[in-house]
Amino acid sequence: MPSFLKLNLPSKLPSRRQWTQFFKLLNPKEKKVFFSFLFLFLASSLFLYFDFYFRNTIAVPQEGGRIKEGFVGQPQYINPLLSFPSEIDKSLVELLFSGLMTYDQNGEIIPDLIKSYEFKDDGKTFEFSIKENAKWQDGKPLTMEDVIFTIDLVQNSKSLSLLRPNWQGVTIEKISENDGRLKLKQPYSGLLENLAVLKIIPEHIWANIQPENFALNTDLNIFNPVGSGPFKVKQVKQRKDKSIESITLTKNDYYSGKKAYLDEVDFIFFSKKEDLISALKRKQIQSARLESYKDYDPKTFKSFELTELQAPKYFAAFFNLQKKIFSEKDIREAFTMATDRNEIIQSALESKASAVDSPILPAYFGFNSSASVYPFDIEKAKSLLANQDFVAKDGQTVKTVEKLPKFQLTKDLVFGNKGTEVERLQECLAKDSDVYPEGTVTGEFGDKTKAAVIKFQEKYASEILAPSNLTKGNGKVLAGTREKLNQLCYPAPTEETSLSFSLTTVNNPDLIKIAEILKNQWEKIGAKVEIKLLNEEEINKAIRERNFEVLLFEESLSSIPDPLPFWHSLQIIDPGLNVSGYENKKADELLVQARKYYGQKDPNRQKTLEEFQDIVIGDAPAVFLCNQDYFYLTDRSIKGIEIKKIVESSKIFSDLSNWYVQTQRQWKK
């Protein structure tokens, strides 16, 4: 290398003493420039490091942490056989117990304890295998014996399980320790749904307890329930009055499914909604289901996330078709057309709902609807009422109907006749002293009676004699004379049917508001509506006895829609849920046929239900109003909530294994 290119580079870095000498060589201005550049260098290096780190890593869930969930009310039975209809009990059961099937984040039914399954014999046989590693939280194996034990209990009337109707006519056989077979009398589309709803209970815990005593075992139903779900009960705290203050759940290490990230979940119980909302504001709890969207204030809950969950349920006003006023289709159509659903949604539910025209929720399930729905049209509604002879009278809308009179003259009567009809003739004539001054009632048609008939005929000559071209009475009671006598003395009584009825609903803020709007809307077509508010026990009694005229109620479908319990004619009598008393032979046939398509996505079942839907819409047994989603409020620290569709509010927890509050960064692959 040429000598002029050689550099005299130092053999080592300057020592610390040399660096201190370096700074002595710099004047203040040079020092300021040097440290400025040094700061920029370090800041840039730090920025580049973190930029590289965050671009090449991702935040992933980390195990650990806990959340506190709030509820209004008290737990009663953390027991799959007794938990209905309490949302609190069902929510706890969802986390503590496993079913053969469960729901995913889209509301679809997927295996839980089941490892594999197959339909055979055109859907009348269901063979399945359960996971070999399935265990109860006490470490004992969960086997086919537990499954058989649970189904037998549900079918036993002494267990008082509300799930019993869903399992009638189903038999279960054990093939091996982990394999079983369900036999049905006919294919049933709702079988997978039933397998998801039913949670399995341990035979070794409950076998020695009589079914009729299940509800009395507070220890197993509250303090120490034994399940096979992702969590188990760690602690139950009671207040001085023995009410439950909180239940702490901890991770179940024996769970056969995906292990939860969270270590613990606290369920905190409040006596009223206001206390729960206050606890959310103070962040004493991190999550809760809101009773109504109106409970959500974005300004107050800035650090919370509101999740809207679609659910297959809807509000409807069900006509009691056993009541005479609603027996005519025109009347039901009139009230349907007098209903403005948009006003209900905007005023009662604050836009957090959508209009519903069908009993099978086509928007939720992806069905089509070819039926002509009823538009909001007040004038058309009034016209339909007029078709049924309802007219305005003294500020009300009434219909006048002639009834059969208790008595009328029916025979031709002449001189010499005797009997009851002659007595009635004489009584009628005696009402006019000018016609029959003697007024005697003998039952014999003599001279005086004949003379009275002649006077009567000539008094009403224009109506009796003139039509027959007569000028003088003949004293014979024939058709014309008899008609006038009946008109004056034995007229057909009339009955006025007022367009008035009661609208019965639950004492719930949203339903009360909807009821008030319906009352105002229907009164615009002349109806007089009385709102009756009942508590839950009273409304259940009214439904069982069909003791209502119009029922404003919320009806819930399942993830595999099966409207048969709500609309088949055999379900009119309790415990059937056909509250309207609706009967249509073709609709019955379609409902039975739809159950035979056992595949979740069978297009034939969809087509059958769409045909049923069009029939019901055409018959108008109810005014279908709107559906409202569930509203779930969570602190933004809670991540992983991906569920969007649920069958009922408790199913929000079917996805809880994916929730987390702690994260760690991991290099991208």
Image (tube, rainbow, N blue to C red):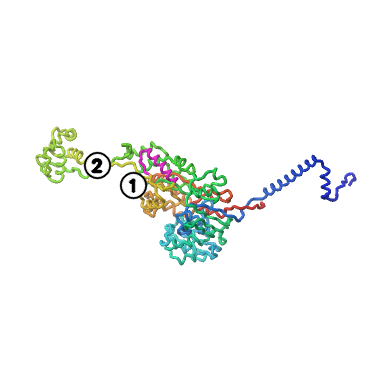
The mark nearer the N terminus, 1 or 2, is 1
Residue at the disc numbered 1: 323
Q: Nearer the viewer, residue 13 or 576?
A: 13
Q: Which residue is mark 2?
A: 493
Instruction: Find residue 181 and report its horizontal and vertical position in percent.
Output: 48, 62
Please identify the dominant SS of the magenta region.
helix
Residue at the front extreme, as displayed: 240
Q: Secondary structure at mark 1?
A: loop
Q: Is residue 38 left or right of residue 625?
A: right
Q: Are marks 1 and 2 in contact (CB under 8 Å)?
A: no
Q: Residue at x 31, y 36 (%)?
A: 394
x and y percent of residue 362 in the render? Answer: 47, 46
Residue 419 vs residue 659, the one in the foreground: 659
Q: Is residue 437 visible?
A: yes
Residue 515 forms part of the magenta stretch: yes
Answer left or right for 428 relative to 632. Answer: left
Q: Amino acid at mark 1?
A: Lys
Residue neighbourhood size for the residue with mark 2, other residues' Cα within 10 Å, grouped as few (<14), some (14–19), many (≥20)? few
Q: Is residue 502 above or below residue 257?
A: above
Q: Amino acid at mark 2?
A: Pro
x, y percent for residue 128 = 51, 61
Residue 365 appears in the picture as rendered: no
The residue segment tinted magenta is 509-530
* Residue 489 drawn in magenta: no
